[in-house]
Amino acid sequence: MKFSFRPTDGAFYELFSRAADNHVRGTELLQELALPGVDVQSVSERLTEVEHDSDQLTHELYQKINSTFVTPFDREDIYRLGSLLDDVMDHLEAVGNLLYLYGLTKLPALPREMHELVNVLDQQAKLTADAMPRLKSMKDLEDYWIECNRLENEGDRSYRMLLVRLFSGEYDALTVLKMKEVADELEAACDAFEHVANTVQTIAVKES
């Protein structure tokens, strides 16, 4: 039988789970942008509120690390996971803000590939939110990081096809520049979810 001298304090796991739940809220808000007659400014403002909440969670996590003598797993891994979860939310907020500030939702329609990327992010968000509570037991996590990596590959394909479309001559040069910046943030968010999954895999291997 394996014994562990690690504490069973659930505060760290709760903070990870709350951060991941914010990702789900973030991707759901991004999906609202595809709805007809949507109030884009409201969506952007709500995304900013969620991002601010995520920042507060990250701050609480760091305070918890600094005030805890023995952590559930390595401090550097806790810092890294918390930071990466925060990175995801930063990219999601940037997507919504840029779409609003650049007025891109006033186009007749956003590129199909952009919606595909948002759908990938939504799947990654829900997958991550479902996985975070399982960190406490370190069980049944392998399917999570495998699927998250598969989704990141799917997002990469959509991103490449989006670039092809942007540079096909369908849009004027200024619109291309604006949408390219949004596309880069979408792709960065997909990558950030993968980085979270890879870090969870590293932690699980260390703790096994």
Image (cartoon, rainbow, N blue to C red):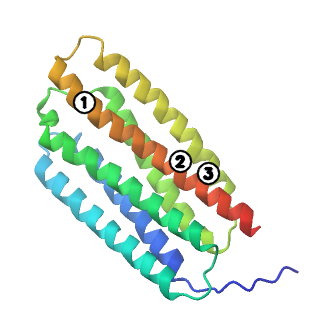
Report the amino acid beneath label 3: Trp
Q: Secondary structure at mark 3?
A: helix
* Residue that badge 2 annotates: 194
How far from the left and from the top, in percent, is residue 62? 44, 76
Report the amino acid beneath label 1: Met
* Residue that badge 3 annotates: 145
Q: Nearer the viewer, mark 3 or mark 1?
A: 1
User: Residue 54 occupies which quadrant of the picture?
Assistant: bottom left
* Residue that badge 1 annotates: 179
Q: How many other residues sit within 10 Å of disc 3, few (<14), some (14-19) or many (≥20)? A: many
How far from the left and from the top, in percent, is residue 35? 21, 42
User: Residue 204 occupies which quadrant of the picture?
Assistant: bottom right
Report the amino acid beneath label 2: Glu
Q: CA distance from mark 3 to mark 1?
A: 29 Å
How far from the left and from the top, in percent, is residue 43? 18, 53
Q: Nearer the viewer, mark 2 or mark 3?
A: 2
How many numbered discs sit on the rendered protein? 3
Q: Are marks 2 and 1 in contact (CB under 8 Å)?
A: no
N-terminal of the pair, mark 3 or mark 1, is: 3
Give whichever of 72, 133 is nearer the camera: 72
Q: How many other residues sit within 10 Å of disc 1, few (<14), some (14-19) or many (≥20)? A: many
Quadrant of the image for the N terminus?
bottom right
